[in-house]
Amino acid sequence: MNSIERIDEFLRLQDKGIPLEEIASTLGVKPQTLKRSLNKNGYKNVKGKYLKKDICESNASVQVAFEDTNLIEQKNSNNTKTTRADTKKKKTVVKSKKENQKEKNTLEKSLKTNANSKTKNKSKKDKKINLTQEDLDKLCEVYDWYLEVKDFKSLKRKTRKKDINIDFNETEDKTISIKVDKGVWEDFLRLCSNSNYDRKTLVTQALNDFMKAHKDLL
């Protein structure tokens, strides 16, 4: 499930009144990861409920518009004949509205300029790597998984044991009977169990290496 499908499922469950933590558990992600995904996709927490930012702004503007219309209708019904003082007040209200609109337009332009400059700077810095929202969500999930399992010993790489190098020339077999120290013999049997060669080959190689080390005694 990608980030868009996850958010659609979250919104559907949110409308049913299910808390965010339970929804995150149902979707198989952490609450922090779900919140991060919602914020990156333009959703805002309004009184415990996540809504699209543009929807919040449109609702606010519609509410203000209705309030202004009701005020104008109430003034027209109560005051059939306006006085000069009322006219001055209306002009002041109109001027204040125009000033607020100018300030709003200026703020929007500055925000757009900052957003464009940020996107340009990001595009310049990120010429080599292009990551989508889905890629970022996967990286966050991998990082959360790494924090949980980084101390597990089972993930450590096991070293591979090297086998013994056999380099003597085989001749006829010779059967002998000798006495060996018990501890040395037990270690030798353990070595044989971890090797791919039989006891005869390993004993012969051990004697061969010993004689190479003491050629002066031959």
Image: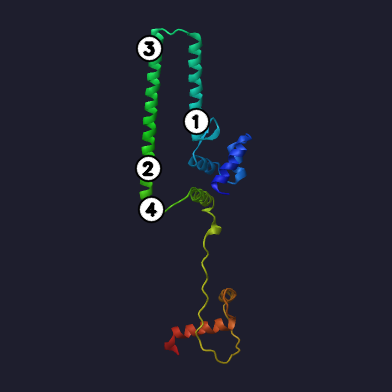
The one nearer the camera, 203 or 101, is: 101
The vertical placement of 52 against 67, above or below, is below
Secondary structure type for disc 2: helix
Mark 4 or 2, nearer chain start: 2
Q: CA distance from mark 4 to mark 2?
A: 14 Å
Q: Are marks 1 and 3 in contact (CB under 8 Å)?
A: no
Label 3: which residue? 88
Image mark for residue 25: none
Mark 2 or 1, nearer chain start: 1
Residue 71: x %, y % from top left:
49, 16
Q: CA distance from mark 4 to mark 3?
A: 58 Å
The vertical placement of 201 against 105, above or below, is below
Mark 1 or 4, nearer chain start: 1
Q: Quadrant of the C terminus?
A: bottom left
Q: CA distance from mark 1 to mark 4?
A: 36 Å
Residue 94: x %, y % from top left:
40, 19
Mark 4 or 3, nearer chain start: 3
Label 1: which residue? 58
The one nearer the camera, 181 or 133, is: 133
Q: CA distance from mark 1 to mark 3?
A: 31 Å
Q: Residues within 10 Å of mark 2 (few under 14, many from 20)?
A: few
Q: Is residue 190 left or right of residue 95?
A: right
Image mark for residue 127: 4
Q: CA distance from mark 2 to mark 3?
A: 45 Å
Image mark for residue 118: 2
Query: Three-letter amino acid code at disc 1?
Result: Ser
